[in-house]
Image (spheres, rainbow, N blue to C red):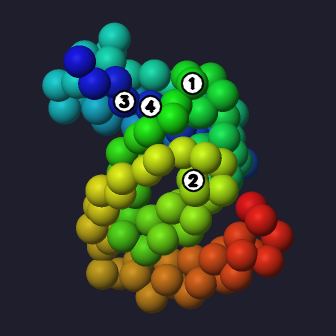
Amino acid sequence: EAKVIVSGGQGEDEDIPEAQSMRNYLMVHGIDENRILMEDQSTNTYENLKFSMDLYDVKHAVVVSNTYHLYRTKIIAKRLGMKMEALAAETPMRSKKKMYVREYAAIMKTILFDR
């Protein structure tokens, strides 16, 4: 039986960690809580992957994220030694331009600073 790792800490403007929010969503949509593992300390994509790998001994994962985010996630996973498959979630049209611009900058940071 497959497990789901939800990963993400709590931002300054958030009431609960991102991981908790994702866990709640999955449970409301019928995923048994025993199948959901949480990593709620990470603050960026590198930490999402690294902390999840360390906590749960992850070597191979299917990562679900927004379409624009998966390219960088694959770069980081490869650098960490994780075999990763990508499953893209659609990005709402109203967010696309802003998020693609932000992600371009994040990709440059990842390439230049290895994070």
Q: Which residue is mark 4?
A: 5
Residue in the image at 32% along x and 18% along y? 35
Asked whether the beta carbons under mark 3 and mark 4 sit within 8 Å of each other, the answer is yes
Q: Amino acid at mark 3?
A: Val
Image quadrant where one finds the N terminus:
top left
Rounded to the nearest angstrom, the CA distance separating label 3 from label 1 is: 13 Å
Query: Image check: 32 left or right of 104?
Result: left
Which quadrant of the figure has residue 66?
A: bottom left
Q: Indicate the secondary structure of the residue bearing disc 4.
A: strand
Rounded to the nearest angstrom, the CA distance separating label 3 from label 2 is: 17 Å
Is residue 11 visible to the viewer in this orientation of the structure?
A: no
Compare residues 112 and 105 and report the one nearer the observer.
Answer: 112
Residue in the image at 44% along x and 39% along y? 60
Q: Position of residue 33 (x, y in %)?
A: 32, 15
Rounded to the nearest angstrom, the CA distance separating label 1 from label 4 is: 11 Å
Which quadrant of the figure has residue 9?
A: top right
Rounded to the nearest angstrom, the CA distance separating label 3 from label 4 is: 4 Å
Image quadrant where one finds the C terminus:
bottom right
Instruction: Give the mark toward the camera: 2 or 4.
Output: 2
Q: Which residue is mark 1?
A: 57
Compare residues 102 and 107 and report the one nearer the observer.
Answer: 107
Q: Indicate the secondary structure of the residue bearing disc 3.
A: strand
Q: Which residue is mark 3?
A: 4
Q: Indicate the secondary structure of the residue bearing disc 1.
A: loop
Q: Amino acid at mark 2?
A: Ala
Instruction: Please give the label number shown on residue 77.
Output: 2
